Image (spheres, grey):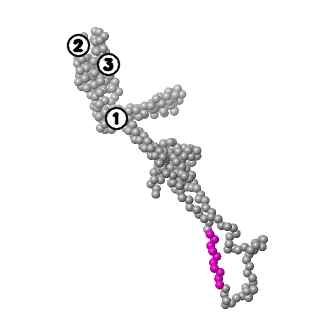
Amino acid sequence: MLATGAAGGVGTFTNIKGAYGSGTALGAVAAGEGATAVLALVLLGLTMLGQASPLVVRAGLWLLPAAASVMAAMAADGPGRTVIYAVTPMGMCVSAEGMAFLARRIVVHTDGRDAEAEHRAAAVVRSLAFHRARAANHPDARVRKWSERTSWRLARKVGTGDVSLGSLLLDVQRERVTTGADVALADMFAVAVTPERHAVTAPVTPALPPAPEPSTASASPAAEDTPVTAPRDGEDTQVNPAMPTSEEESVTAAVPPVTLDEVAAVAGVPTPHPAEPLTDVQLVVVLRHLRYADDPPLSYRQAVTAFRDAGFVGGEQRIRSAWGALMAQEESTP
């Protein structure tokens, strides 16, 4: 890069020397390539220190070689030489930009931060905050409309060139893809477990205790003379209190279903309600309730359909994450 810049300076000096003399050529090289070299060293030093370069430095790296190109083109005596003379000073510009770019990449690789990208991102965010505030509170309707449009244009630039933001977004995307694959595989290969139903029968009437033996010692005459008869009903039919009036049947006790309030109480969260924002734990509670509201338990697609039909609100990615957490709990529960 240094050799390319030096060759460009020597070429500019030679081209202008033939038309205006060595003094003028030396001044032109100093004003063009020399000043560009100074700005290149400033840019390189600021980059190595992890600081953003001022706008005047970046602009000078292009404006000064452009001025030298115009000066050299005016010294040419033909179209062919005009093009050659005009292109020669640009070698210094390319050398300066190349050194600054390489130094910035080295700093980003070693320190993990890009000062130029952070400076641009901060400027975009500050401008965006200003235009959003002016679009909301400025008294002039035209100014509010113009700031509204400008804020939308600035929104497209947020995060551009931010290496750290790109790495974080890739990590988030990897986590979402992993969760989605886990949910899809669990939905495909999970075996529905039917809960055992135990028949609970009505209690059986206990047998009558054995009748006590009659006492032979002393008996009341009134008791001996009084006949013992079984009670009779209204139709004068004898009724035995020890026997049931109808055949006993095995009755299966109905187990009441678990309500959403009970599931939420066990999880220690407020009861989820339709059309209201839900936390991650509330999402798991709703999916658990919907999954086991039927026999066999619902699959992921069936649970999502029931979730939407019930009026609950939640994004697709959040529902997938909650379902993955539910499946993980089921696998870890004996």
Element assignment for label 3: helix
Task: Give the residue at mark 2.
Answer: 17
Can the viewer see residue 161 in this picture? yes
Q: Which residues are magenta?
A: 204-213
Residue 208 lies in the magenta stretch: yes
* Marks 3/1: CA–CA distance: 28 Å
Q: Which residue is located at x 74 percent, y 79 percent? A: 229
| Residue at the outermost top position | 77
* Marks 3/2: CA–CA distance: 18 Å
Mark sitting earlier along the chain (3/1): 3
Frontmost residue, 125 versus 152: 152
19 left or right of 280 in image: left
| Residue 66 numbered mark, or none | 3
Chief secondary structure of the magenta span?
loop
Q: Which residue is located at x 26 percent, y 24 percent? A: 37
Residue 223 lies in the magenta stretch: no
Residue 119 image-quadrant placement: top left
4 left or right of 130 in image: left
Frontmost residue, 223 versus 138: 223
